[in-house]
Image: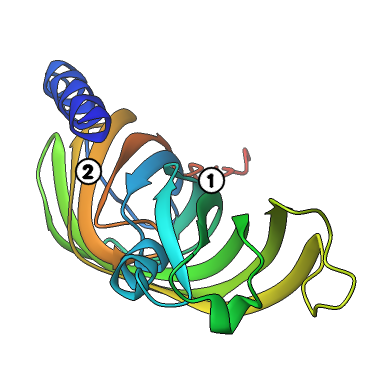
Amino acid sequence: MKILLQFFLVFNLLLLNARHSAAQSPRNQFEIQGSFGGYSGIEVIDDIGTGGEENYQGGNTNNFVSFKYYISAKIAIGLSIGYQTIWGESNPDDLAYNGGILYNFFEHYYTIAPEITKVYRTGPNFQTYGFIGIGGSYIIREYDFYQGFPQNNSYRPFTKSGTLRTQITPFGLRFGTGFAGFFEFGFGYKGMINAGFSVKFPPRKKVISVDKK
C-alpha cells in the first residue's frame, strides 16, 4: 500500500510538470534520475523459496541513482547505483538444515549496473522507452542468533558475497521536460514498479567563431 501511495503521488506530480514543452532527448544530452522501486527480483526469488530453509519476511524499497548519456535521439547508455535490504528468519520446521539454531537474517545489497536505453517515442513533454541492465551486487548478510553465536557451526555474524544482477524494463514513461517524473514496469534489481524524478541537462551548444577581416 505504501508503494502504491508513493507511485500515485509521483504520477500526479508528473502531470503537473507536463505543461511545459521542449525536445526530450536530443543527442549528447545528459540525464540524472533518482528512483525507488518495489518487489525486486531477489524478493521474488526469496518469496518463492519461503517455507524451505529460510522464511523471507520483507524488504525496503530499492533506492537508485542513475546516469544516462544520449548518444543519439533514440539510444542512451548509462549506469545505475543502488541499495536495498531484505530480511527473514530460519525456518523452525527445518531444524535438520540449520542444526536446531534459530536466527534472523538481514541482507544488504549494494548494486552497480551499466544500462542501455531505447527510446520508443518522444513528444513535446513526454517520452516512452525501455531498457536493459546487467551488473552485480555486493552482499553483506547479518545474522541475529536467538541462542548466541554457534561455536560449532559454519554460520558467522557477517558474511560477504557477490551475485550477478539484471534488469529488464520493457516500458517506461517520463512526463515533463528538463525536470520531470517517471515510472517504469519491469523485472530485476530495480523492482517490478520503479518511479522517481529525472533532470535532463541541455547539450552544450557549439560556438562557431567568425574571423573578422
Coordinates of residue 83 in the picture (x, y in percent): 57, 50
Image check: 142 left or right of 69? Answer: right
Element at badge 1? loop
| Residue 23 visible in the shown view | yes
Q: Which residue is mark 2?
A: 183
Residue at left offset 42%, top offset 42%: 61
Q: Furthest-right residue in view?
A: 151
* On-image quarter of the C terminus: top right
Residue 105's place in the image compared with 11, above or below, is below
Element at badge 2? strand
* On-image quarter of the N terminus: top left
Coordinates of residue 26 in the picture (x, y in percent): 31, 52
Q: Which residue is mark 1?
A: 208
Query: Which is more N-terminal, label 2 or label 1?
Result: 2
Place residue 183 in its image quadrant.
top left
Could you tell me the amino acid type at mark 1?
Ile
